[in-house]
Structures are given as structure tokens and as C-alpha cells.
Amino acid sequence: MSLIADLGAGLSLEEISAHRAFNFRGVHLFSAYSQFAEVVKVATDHTYAVLLSAQDKRGLFIFTVTDYVANKKVSLRYAVKSYQITPSGQIISPGFQ
């Protein structure tokens, strides 16, 4: 399963931590939390967070679309915030076994 959220326009990759990818403003309001989905619309100058979750890997990366021409090209800047590979193919978290 992988999910993506549009964090909005005008954000710097450097100011987005793993924590802020889920709630950039840090305000405890339902509307302030990032809305992760299977697909989102592409927009220039928008920053997106992607959650990766598979049997043998998981991660979080952020990217900003710097140039976009529909069905022709996309340019982006990205930062990997977290990435983990488990050679055994099993990610185990206490309490979820």
C-alpha cells in the first residue's frame, strides 16, 4: 500500500519533517491533518508527501513539483525522510503481531 497527500503550495522541503508531513501547521484540528489518498491532482509549486508500505520496505518521501506539462513532463525536487528495508521481508512492530 502506498498513499500520497498534497501538502499545499509554497512549502520548502527543508521545513517539512516527518512529523510535519502529517500535520504541517501542528494544530490539533481534523482539517489541519494531511489527507492521504491513492491519487491526487498534480499542481506546479505544490509539495506532496508519499507513504510507502510493503512487506519488505517502508518509507516517507516529500517532493515539490517545480514544472509540469500534462502528459508530457514533470520536474521535481525531493527529499527522503525515512526509508527502511527488511531483508527477511517482515516488518514487526510491538503490539501489532
Image: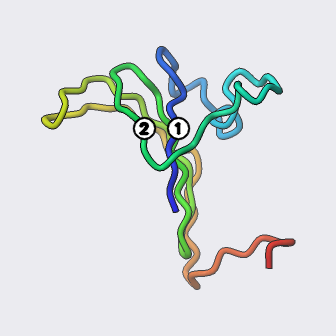
Kindly identify the residue that appears in the image at 23 percent across and 33 percent down. Answer: 74
Amino acid type indicated by mark 2: Val
Give x and y (percent) for residue 80. Answer: 50, 45
Describe residue 71's horizontal placement relative to residue 24 as left or right.
Answer: left
Q: Residue furthest top?
A: 10
Q: Quadrant of residue 93?
A: bottom right
The residue carrying mark 2 is: 40
Describe residue 75's horizontal placement relative to residue 60 as left or right.
Answer: left
Give x and y (percent) for residue 37. Answer: 52, 45
Mark 2 vs mark 1, CA separation in Å: 7 Å
Amino acid type indicated by mark 1: Ala
Disc number for residue 5:
1
Q: Quadrant of residue 76?
A: top left
Foreground label between 2 and 1: 2
Q: How is the image coloured?
A: rainbow
Q: Residue furthest right?
A: 95
Q: Residue furthest left?
A: 72
Q: How many marks?
A: 2
Query: Secondary structure beneath disc 1?
Result: strand
